[in-house]
Amino acid sequence: MATIWNYRVLKTNDGICDTFSIREVFYDATGKPDMFGPEEEVIGFELSDLSYLMRIMGLALERPVLTVDDFKPKGSDA
């Protein structure tokens, strides 16, 4: 089965304030968020690459915001 991923907005809190970032989110076989990537930089080999990435990253703004609590801990069956 292929790995399913998309860009999502992730809300985190450093103990002082909430921040929002767009991250790659990977899902398990049941569709539950499984892990997320580092904060993204938009980099491409062509200008059209940047346009494409910005469009698909923009779709994250149309989906519910995730938090760290939405991801199951490693080794958990939850």
Image (cartoon, helix red, strand yellow):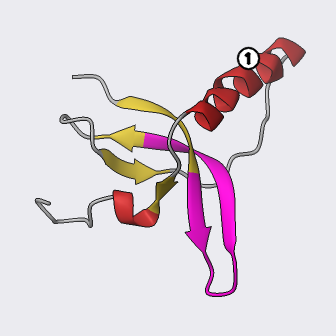
In the figure, 10 relative to 12: above or below? above
In the figure, 12 relative to 25: above or below? below
Region of the chain picked out in magenta, as a range: 10-25
Quadrant in which the N terminus is drawn: top left
Residue 72 shown left or right of residue 38 in the figure: left
Give the dominant element type of the magenta stretch: helix, strand or loop: strand
Is label 1 in a helix, a strand or a loop? helix
Q: Is residue 69 magenta?
A: no
In the figure, 55 relative to 7: above or below? above
Depth order, front residue of 57/64: 64
Mark 1, Cα crowd under 10 Å, few <14 / some 14-19 / many 20+, is: few
- The residue to which callout 1 is attached is 52
- Given the image, on which type of amino acid does mark 1 rest? Tyr
**Residue 42 visible in image:** yes
**Residue 45 visible in image:** no
Depth order, front residue of 53/15: 15
Toward the top, the furthest residue is: 48
Q: Residue 40, image x and y in percent?
A: 69, 46
Quadrant position of residue 54: top right
Which residue is at 69% across, 79% downward?
17
Quadrant in which the C terminus is drawn: bottom left
Which residue is at 56% across, 54% downward?
10
Toward the bottom, the furthest residue is: 15
Quadrant position of residue 74: bottom left
Which residue is at 34% across, 58% downward?
71
